[in-house]
Image (tube, rainbow, N blue to C red):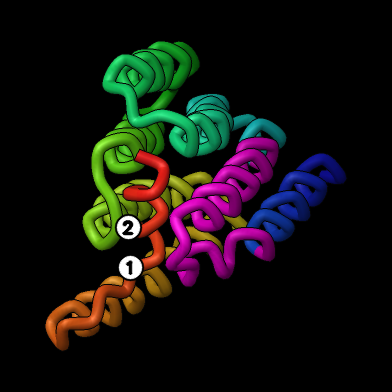
Amino acid sequence: MTAYWLAQGVGVIAFLIGITTFINRDERRFKMQLALYSATIGGHFFLMGAWPAGMSAGLNALRTLISLRTRSLWVMALFIILTLALGLVKLHHPIELLPVIGTIASTWALFRTTGLTTRCVMWCSTVCWVIHNFWLGSIGGTLIEGSFLVMNGVNIIRFWRMQKRGIDPFRVEKALAEKEG
């Protein structure tokens, strides 16, 4: 029983780390905080015995950090292959496919999209994780992913409204990308 509560405690810590992730407009800070959250929640899933979710979350952390340096199709493809290979090895129930699907979608988003599109794909990925975490009985995981669903959804609507008014909420991000590229 102690191991269960340790796992739940790590999940709550992940919740506290991740709660403000999607508020960031700065792509670099967004990705760094997302990576820290992913590593922590990955530890939670391993402690819960949910190996496909733990593998996916661990790969999420590494993939998110690497996506800060490159948007290479080869690197993206490598992470998708790794997600499939490692995520499917210990699969015991069809619901355990959801984190794998969510990770593949978010991998594509982080390597191939920016701004509002990234957040929309991440929202869909989050739906997969919410369903999985609820099924698993992960208190912290369900709370954080449910929060991500709401917070990211609200921010998607807010950013979309800003764009409709002619305000670019990702102006700083675009300027940095142009400066680097």
Could you tell me which residue is drawn at 55 percent across and 56 percent down?
29
The answer to whether the residue labelled 1 contacts the one labelled 2, judged by CB atoms less than 8 Å apart, is yes
Q: Let me know if residue 168 appears in the view.
A: yes
How many discs appear?
A: 2
Whether residue 164 is situated above or below residue 75 in the rendered picture: below
Viewed as shown, does residue 117 lie left or right of 148?
A: left
Which residue is disc 1 drawn over?
Answer: 171
Which secondary structure type mostly characterizes the magenta part of the structure? helix
Q: Name the residue furthest left.
A: 164
Q: Quadrant of the N terminus?
A: top right
SS at badge 1: helix
User: Within the magenta stretch, is there residue 31?
Assistant: yes
Q: CA distance from mark 1 to mark 2?
A: 5 Å
Instruction: Classify residue 114 as left or right of residue 173.
Output: left
Magenta-tinted stretch: 16-44
In the picture, residue 106 is in which quadrant?
top left
List x then y, in percent, for residue 153.
Answer: 31, 71
